[in-house]
Amino acid sequence: MTPFKLTLLAKACLITGLALTSPTLVAAEKTIPELVDAVNGTPDAASREAGKKVKLRNHTKGFCTSGTFKPDPQLQQTLAIPFFNQDAIKVTARFSLGGTNPQISDKTAGRFMSLKIDGDKENLNFVTTNVPVFFASNLEDFFTFQTKVKQGAEGKQWLIDNQPSAKAFFDYVKQLPPSPSFANSRYYGVNSFLFSPQKGGAQQGETVAGKWIFEPVAGTAALSASELANLGDDFLKAEFLARIKTQPAQWNLYIQLAETGDEINDPTVIWPETRQRLLVGQVVINGGRDSDPQVQQCDKGIFNPLLLPKGIAASADPILNARTAAYVESFIRRQ
């Protein structure tokens, strides 16, 4: 294992605590290795070993690039998050499609954006998708979903017939048209976090719950059937990297705030669009650091959504709290 990989693993171990030694720490219902097997489609020892040889992982098809994050100074009037008191902060980004198939077509609707924002003393990672609703609210349903979708049409129909959250997810994806660019997608953090308000500010109480939303400055866009037919299966990476050579891709980052009665520990629930949003800042992806080893190696590590600065804490969402341990398990299998 290279020194770079050892460093990544050491950091992951420190972050996840007992995650590497206690695979049942998240829930007795399913272990972390079982969850990773469900995602990878490796239910037995033979398939698991075969998966390790090809470095099987979710979001296999993707690429890394870079940019900056510019915090909005007005945020500090509402929330007490010292991390956002900095000027422009360096960003490492990975854009990807879902699944373990490296040949998946870009004509599918799913788009994913993961970010590492590395400040002077603290860090903040994001794992986001263009679908605002998740397909499972607990680890048991997550395992069932991942297992059933590997069975093809029959398994998908079972989920539609037996799991309302899975049906709602499929219904949303079905009406979601593919975007012509990663830059034309809105990205959601489906899990909730807890934010510390400024004392005496508009938000009262010890913490306020919220979700991340990235709004594309270029606006959202959808490919028509005729446009889609004229494209190949691998247009997204080339389009994006060509785009940022002339004009950066940009997103405004917001926190959508929960109100009393909103479900904050269940990612299958979408909050009303009328919920208040706070502008956090702007992500600017321009490829300026793409020659840096950190950027070139970013797809070999993990994006840890629980690596949080002071003033931000994880909610009790079981899906959120299983992510890091699962990512570390997947990372270890790829070495």
Image (cartoon, rainbow, N blue to C red):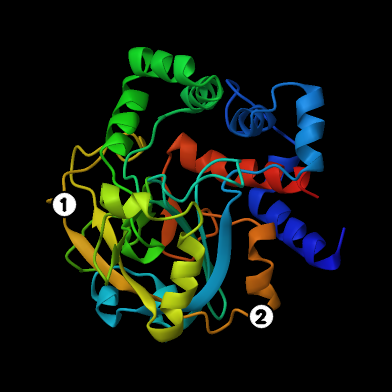
* Residue 253 sits in quarter: bottom left
Q: Position of residue 291 (x, y in %)?
A: 65, 81
Instruction: Report the amino acid beneath label 1.
Output: Arg
Taking depth in this image into account, of 79 and 234 the one nearest to the observer is 234
Q: Position of residue 117 (x, y in %)?
A: 51, 71
As drawn, the label of residue 292 is 2
Taking depth in this image into account, of 315 and 222 the one nearest to the observer is 222
Q: Is residue 292 left or right of residue 285?
A: right
Q: Is residue 254 visible?
A: yes
* 2 or 1: tag closer to the N-terminus: 1
Q: Is residue 182 left or right of residue 331?
A: left
Q: Does 247 sit above or below residue 79? A: below
Please give the residue where the numbered disc 1 appears in the rendered image: 275
Q: Residue at x 36, y 49 (%)?
A: 229
Q: Does 250 sit above or below residue 110? A: below
As drawn, the label of residue 183 is none
Q: How far is the residue under mark 2 from the one under mark 1?
A: 39 Å
The secondary structure type at the circle numbered 1 is loop
